[in-house]
Structure formats: C-alpha cells, structure tokens
Amino acid sequence: MEEHNPHVVDTDMVGFTPADYVIVLPQKRDDYGEVLKRSYNLLVLIVRNLLAAKLEVSWFPSTCGKMVFIRASANHDRLVDEAERVELQRRQQVRFKREYDPDNETFTEFQRAEEHTFFNTFKMNGPVTFTSLERQRLVLSIMMAPYAENGAQMQEYAPYISDMYPMHDEAEVQVVMELSYGPRAHWYGGCPIRELRDYFGEEVALHFAFLDFETQWLSSLALGAVCVQADQFLSGRDTLATPIFALFAQIWAICIMEFWVRKENTLKSQWNVENFEETETTRPEFKGALMYNSVSGIDEMTDTSYWTPFKRVCGHLAIVFTILIATSIALAPTLARSYFLESADYLGVALVAAATYLLLIPISFVTKRIALWITDIENHRTETCLLYTSPSPRDS
C-alpha cells in the first residue's frame, strides 16, 4: 500500500468517487506538529481492513489537521455479492414490464439471477443500480461484518472512531425536492412516500406517511369546524352544532387511529419490515465486545461494561431532576402572571410573558444537551433503541 502524506490533502483523491460512508479518526500530533505513530498506525490498520473487504477507500486530513476522514464506497459487483449475502430487500416488479408500474411492485430478497427485475426509483432507465440508501446499508454491512464473512469488523475500532456517518446523494435529493414542492409535485400537496422510503429509509418514510395521512383527515375535521363557526356566528355561541361537532370529533379521533393502523400495516407489509427489530444490525457507535450468543448461535456485539446499568440509573435520575428544575422555573412566571391578571396590570403580564420566553430558551438548550449526553453514555446497541430515547442525536 502506498504511503499517504497525512499533511497534504490530495484533491484528486477527495473527488475520486462519491463516498457512501465517512469514518472520522482523531489525528494526534506531538509538540512539533508531527502525527503520532499510534495515530498513523491506526489509520493504516483501518484502511487495510477496508481494502481487504474489497471496498474503495480514500482518505485526507481535516483543515486543522486534528482529524482524518476515511471515505468508503464499493463497486457494483461487491454490492451485489453483499446484497445476496445479507438478503437485501429490494423493490421488484411482480411481473416484468417495460414500463414501471408503482401498483405492480413488492419488496423481495435480492438475487443476482433476477437483477433485471429490480428497480431503482430514482433511475428508471439504463443499467440497474442500487439507490444511495441501499449502497449505504450494504457498505455499512461490509464494514461491520466479521473477517470470516469478508468484512472489515469495524466494531473492534469503535473506541477509537470519533464519528461515522453516511453521505448524501445530490441527484436523489433533487428528485425528492422536486416531488415534494417542486415542478413535479402534486397540486394538492402530499409526500412522495415511495421516494422518501428509498432515500431516508422505512422509519422516516412512515413518519411522513403519517403526516400525509393526518393532513388529509384533518381536512374533514376543519370543514366541520368551519360549519360550526359559521353557525355560531349567525345564531350565537350556544347552538346545537357545538355538541354535535364534539361528538363528531370523538368519532373522528377513533377512526383516524384505526385507519392509520391499517395503512401502517399495509406499508410495513409492502416494504417487508414487519420484523425489522429482529434483524436490526448493531450501531457503529456501540462500544462492546464480540461474544457468543447461545440463543442465536452466532457472535454478537455485547456491552461488557459493569458501569452501563449504573450510568442508565444516573441518566433517569438526571432526567427527573431536570424536569423538576424546569417545572420550578416555569411555575414562578405562571404565578406572577396570575397575580398581575387579578390586578389588571397588563404591562406586568406582558413583562412576565417576555421573561418566561427568555427563560425557556436557555432551559430548552440545557435540557437538550443533558438529554443528548445521557443518550450517548447509555450506549444503545441498535438504532431503534436510540430513537426510543428522547431526544435523538439527530435533533442536535
């Protein structure tokens, strides 16, 4: 392997290929500004493992020289091999047609022999390719796979990796933007659920599917509210329309939840993610050791630290303590506002409202930072466990 000068950014290497994943390593230096030997050896070892896993790799240091970025991607043949190994779920036509039919599709396990029947939502013409989401999932699977399965086994280097994240695909982002609010968007609005799923994944797509579904259902509730408002304007506030609308709102709330469950199950069945949590992979940021699982019969990453339960208990106590502080700080302006309202001092009410707003800004900032810190030290193994905590690091 050719030596790469860590002090020089190779511009040709930076623009070599679109990277699917980026690994960030700290680059420690001595008093003379030279990279320490252990930092350079770690870089060489990780790059060597990635190359041994048949990934395309390039790297360059940051402008400040304190970090080094490793860019990883894979060619089509390597992606196909990994897709067969992990049984990747891909969008496929039930019957082969020359024209793409959204109603004639499903998600099935990828097979090389049937590669021509699989579709890329963002590229209908030309040779069959993987979407950026599929490439990222496959590259991550290669990096996390053990050596015996032709992987890079990056879990071993989790304590030394500062960050690890996927990259955007500008062409696919442009398609999503055009379908959302651009020239290709529907005149009545709505979300391009298919494209959102193929770019951001199933969880984000389900979130926007619910927003789209809820917005459509809210139109009927809004129409009823307008009718009630018109009746109250013409006949006064005490009208028969008010209790009728209240009953309608209760029935509406029950119906929207029941019909959403049906739609959610339909999407999960179409995307073949009913058992997603059972097949979910370990997060790259998870710190642990490979240990044999007697239940599954395979080696899995396991948190072996004795401090993890203690950290989680402390995290819950910190949440309770933070809630008590925030409630106490917010309660004082509320009581002051009630006092000024009773004395009809509206200037005092306005000042209390302004003070409350100014207090809530630092409280919100501090509580979010505390929650992010707690989420990080709890060392969650999967993305689902991470998302169930509040808030997610993506909110920062």
Image: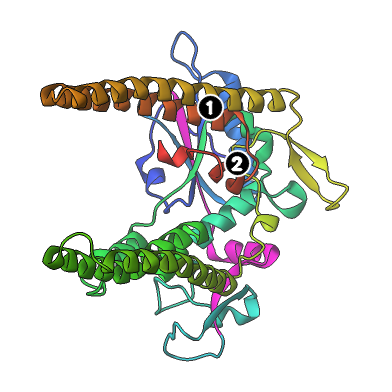
Q: Is residue 161 left or right of residue 59?
A: right
- Based on the displayed image, in which of its 4 quarters is residue 66 positioned? top left
Mark 1 or mark 2, which is nearer the start of the sequence?
2
Q: CB under 8 Å between callouts 2 and 1? A: no
- Residue 259 at least partly seen: yes
Residue at 53%, 34% (x, y): give it: 3
Query: If the image is split into quadrants, where does the N terminus sit?
Result: top right
Kind of residue sitting beneath label 1: Ile
Q: Horizontal and vertical percent for residue 323?
A: 47, 26
Q: Horizontal and vertical percent for residue 226?
A: 21, 67
Q: Is residue 179 left or right of residue 144?
A: left
Q: Horizontal and vertical percent for residue 322?
A: 48, 23
Residue that carries the numbered disc 1 in the rendered image: 319
What is the count of numbered marks?
2
Residue at 48%, 66% (x, y): give it: 254
Q: Secondary structure at mark 2?
A: loop
Where does the magenta region start and end? Answer: 64-93
Residue at 71%, 27% (x, y): give it: 309
Residue at 50%, 86% (x, y): give it: 104
Task: Give 172 or 177, whichever is nearer the viewer.
Answer: 177
Q: Horizontal and vertical percent for residue 310?
A: 69, 23
Kind of residue sitting beneath label 2: Pro
Task: Give 3 or 137, whichever is nearer the viewer.
Answer: 137
Q: CA distance from mark 2 to mark 1?
A: 26 Å
| Rendered image coloring scheme | rainbow
Q: Secondary structure at mark 1?
A: helix
Q: Is residue 183 left or right of residue 279?
A: left
Residue 85 covered by magenta stretch: yes
Q: Which mark is residue 284?
A: 2
Residue 139 covered by magenta stretch: no
